[in-house]
Amino acid sequence: MIQGLLEARREPNDAEPNMRLDGTAVGKRGGKGHIEHKMIRDSKTGREYGPYRYLRYRGISRKTGKQALLSVYLGKVAPASST
């Protein structure tokens, strides 16, 4: 019984090399993309906010089901430290 519990608790990366740390699967091709910094403009005031980091990659769009350029928000760019 203990052996079964130990096997159930093993790390997913030990068994599957194509798994991320959070347990989700990595695609067969591994994926490629680039990081893009974007400034977002407020259409009412014209003021710009950012820069924000986005991961841009080619994938299958949920909306159309076809290949498209997709993006994932990664967070705001950290300010440069002044020393």
Image: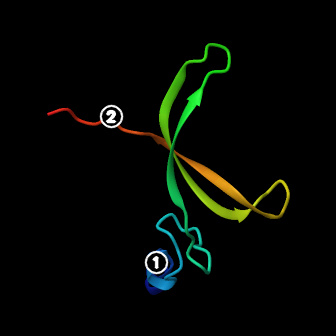
Q: Nearer the viewer, residue 35 or 6?
A: 35
SS class, disc 2: loop
Upstream in the sequence, badge 2 or badge 1? 1
Q: Going by the picture, which residue comes out furthest to the top?
A: 45
Question: Which residue is rendered at x = 44% and y = 75% of the image?
Answer: 11
Question: Which residue is rendered at x = 49% and y = 76% of the image?
Answer: 12
Question: How far across and how far down the image is residue 18, in percent?
Answer: 53, 79
Question: How far across and how far down the image is residue 5, in percent?
Answer: 48, 78
Badge number at residue 79: 2
Q: Going by the picture, which residue comes out furthest to the right?
A: 64
Question: Which residue is rendered at x = 58% and y = 31% of the image?
Answer: 40
Q: Is residue 46 left or right of residue 50?
A: right
The quadrant of the rendering that contains the C terminus is: top left
Question: How far across and how far down the image is residue 50, in percent?
Answer: 48, 31
User: Can you say whether 59 is above or below 51 in the image?
Assistant: below
- The residue that mark 1 highlights is 13
Q: Nearer the viewer, residue 3 or 49?
A: 49
Identify the image quadrant of residue 70. Answer: bottom right
Label 2: few (<14), some or many (≥20) within 10 Å?
Answer: few
Identified by mark 1, the residue type is Asn
Q: Nearer the viewer, residue 74 or 19?
A: 74
Work out how far the residue at label 2 is from the one at label 1, CA to CA, in angstroms.
34 Å
Question: Which residue is rendered at x = 85% and y = 57% of the image?
Answer: 64
Question: How far across and how far down the image is residue 46, in percent?
Answer: 60, 17
Label 1: few (<14), some or many (≥20) within 10 Å?
Answer: few
Q: Going by the picture, which residue comes out furthest to the left?
A: 83
Identified by mark 2, the residue type is Pro
User: Can you say whether 67 is above or below 79 in the image?
Assistant: below
User: Can you say whether 33 is above or below 4 in the image?
Assistant: above
